[in-house]
Amino acid sequence: MISFPRAPLGAILAAVLLTISMPFAAWSSDGDHSGHNHDAATVQHGDIIIKGAWTRQTPPGAKVGGGYLTITNEGQTADRLTGGAAAFAASVEIHEMSVNDGVMKMAELADGLEIEPGQTVVLKPGGFHIMFMGLSEIPMEGDTVNVTLTFANAGEVSLNMPVAAIGATSLDGKANAHGGHNHSHGDHTHDHDHDHGTESN
């Protein structure tokens, strides 16, 4: 009988873990996901500074999702956020949410969102926000997705958005447990809670 030297158990486990982790490392470096990095980095492109970008997981079957961040214009002229692109969505739009007579309404800003010189604009749940339309896949909590935003003057800006939990009100926040609201999006009105059923904004 031929005997082989027995490798230390620790070395075997290390080899197995390395083999398992390699496919995930390759998947997370493709630009759409980058593992479980929850750091929302600051991105500067020309006079535009973007901080704290994040999105959140959408409920099963959702066709839209929301993106949030803070934009500062350090230039001498106004700029305008007009839209963008993401591999997981058919289109990227800029929307505004408002409440009139207890009815929550959301509409696209057809001309985009203007950022005046020296102004800081916060895109957050319940106000201005990025809308991912026609989701082809659901961003999952703990992942990071890549999004390209388009500005009238600054042009295209690529950034990563960590994904928070369904219904989260901030990157590290919990789901909103408040009661339901009437929510109108375009010509459609829905009654549901702050998770917005198949809509997240």
Image (cartoon, helix red, strand yellow):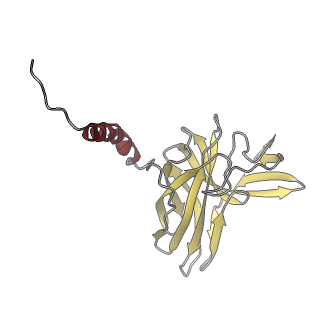
Quarter of the image where one finds residue 25: top left
39 versus 190 height, above or below: below
Side (left or right) of 102 relative to 114 = right
Answer whether residue 152 is visible to the viewer in this image: no
> Quadrant location of residue 3?
top left
Residue 193 visible within the image: yes
121, 57: nearer the viewer? 57
Locate residue 185, reporting x and y percent: 75, 47
Above or below for 4 versus 36? above
- Which image quarter: residue 137? top right
Residue at position x 44%, y 48% in the image: 35
Q: Residue furthest bottom?
A: 76
19 sits to left or right of 153: left
Q: Residue furthest left?
A: 2
Quarter of the image for the N terminus: give it: top left
The residue drawn where x is 60% and y is 40% is: 134
Q: Is residue 113 above or below residue 144?
A: below
User: Residue 75 in the image: x percent, y percent?
Assistant: 53, 79
For the point 41% across and 50% down, the residue is 31
- Image check: 120 left or right of 97? left
Q: Position of residue 50 (x, y in %)?
A: 53, 67
Looking at the picture, tell me which residue is in the foreground, 23 or 113. Answer: 23
x and y percentages locating residue 114 in the rendered image: 64, 69
Counting labels gives 0
Q: Residue furthest top?
A: 1
On the rendered structure, is 146 left or right of 181? left
